[in-house]
Image: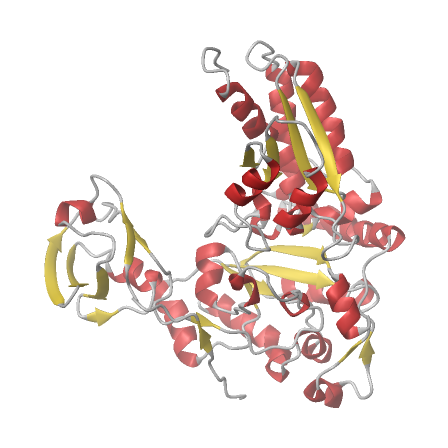
Amino acid sequence: MIATRRRFTDVPDQPGAIAEVAPNSLAAELGLQPGDRIVAVNGRALRDALDFQFYAEAEEVTLEVVRGEEVTLYEVERDSDEPWGITFADPTFDGIHLCNNQCPFCFIKQMPKGMRKSLYVMDDDYRYSMLYGNFITLTNLTEEDWQRIEEQRISPINVSVHATNPELRVALVGNPRAAQIMEDLARLERIGIDYNAQLVLCPGINDGPEMDRTIRDLISLGPHLLSIAAVPVGLSKFGQERQSRRVRLSRTCMRSLPGALLDIRRYTPEEAEGVIAQAEGWQVRFRRERGRTFLQLGDEFYLMTGKPVPPASHYDGFPQVEDGIGITRLFIDDAERLIRRGRKAATAGASGTIACGTLIAPTMQSLVDRVNDALDTRLRVVPIVNTFFGAEINVSGLLTGGLVRDALAGETATDPVFVSHHMLSKRTKTFLDDLHLEDLKGALGRPVFAAEYLTDVVQHLAAARPRIAL
């Protein structure tokens, strides 16, 4: 067995600190305040918010709380379903488990300097998988981690599989421990932990026959595999310049695949059509045998080929929406509902500018044209070429605030600008380049809002007319 070395980063200065206390909650009744630190529950030291959730679910709870220099014990009797109303400043009190891998397509390593600090954190932390839907490789789990996952039922876990061929997965993950992926997934099955699998597909490397092998291996494991998602590899211009588009495997991987060079590149539309056709064969089988699609492709495959995005029923309840699987369908369906309602009076004549990436731009323009007709709005779409990461990085979520600013800087319009909420950090509300919405608003001299759907856009426009309700 290969020993696992654990590395941490971003250890909080005040572990266990409370950021928010919900009004009328149990924590509020106890008098807990932001800044208080919960360090133990029922005598057990806390490592993270998951520990708190697990141990504080009891009906009789003793909290050890630090405020300034004082330590107070709160003995609480509670109903089992009574919420505590606590939001922690940092979800992990001992820092973030760092990645030990050397994936040749790692997007974090393609980041230039001067971006948002959190973008440089290469996490591979099972707790962030549970809390935020992050994908992990399982290569840095210790025996203690495995036992805790089983005891606390930390489920589901999102796993970056990429390939089940041991030698190929070692090459794609850059860690000799990656070879035991089937053993790791079998262990999740044995202890009853649900998981989703992700395949980052690289043309000619882990698609085609290797993708078929991976899918066959995964479905042989058992019932706890909830879904498989396949997304295309992404390379920024920085990754291309540094890696010269050809990425030599690590020395460890070279022993497995002597002399190998991985030619990491993007999919062409023709190759993407091949992936769609291959996936459709599996999807037909899964719908026949399992009653659901089970294998889902990243939206980029459909958008880059011009093929229709599948209907909502295809996505089985959207189990991997955090990985971007199906967000285009959700966006389209929201717009269709908005168009069907068609309440013109609330927004008649209202104008706005929607900034987006070039990949979604044709779909966005088509929907906005129909919304304008249905609601008598004057919405305008501005596709923005990503000159920062490279024109081929064309999704809206990877546009920087500076790109939006520069694209709109010469305009005399004063109507509101709408950007995708995917451009902003959920935590800091900043763009990739650390620009705030307020910074962008000041630079453009016009209102700027983050929106998830066109319904959000229309609601903002209607809110500017308070006498008229939607």
Query: Where 247 falls versus 93 (above or below)?
Result: below
Query: Where 423 falls versus 228 (above or below)?
Result: above
> Is residue 192 in sight in this rendering?
no
Q: Residue at (76%, 28%) from the top-left corner? A: 366
Q: How many marks?
A: 0
Q: In the image, is 177 to the left or to the right of 385? A: left
Residue 275 picture quarter: bottom right
Residue 115 at what x, y percent from top left? 59, 61
Residue 179 picture quarter: bottom right
Residue 252 picture quarter: bottom right
Q: Nearer the viewer, residue 416 or 406?
A: 406
Q: Nearer the viewer, residue 252 or 217?
A: 252
Q: Residue at (78%, 35%) from the top-left corner? A: 362
Residue 216 at what x, y percent from top left? 70, 64
Q: Residue at (79%, 52%) from the top-left corner? A: 391
Q: Nearer the viewer, residue 15 or 443?
A: 443
Residue 348 at what x, y percent from top left? 61, 12
Residue 383 at what x, y percent from top left? 74, 39
Q: Residue at (59%, 66%) from the top-left corner? A: 221
> Is residue 346 in sight in this rendering?
yes
- For this orientation, the residue located farthest to the right is 270
Query: Where 392 falls versus 306 (above or below)?
Result: below
Q: Coloring scheme of the render?
A: secondary structure
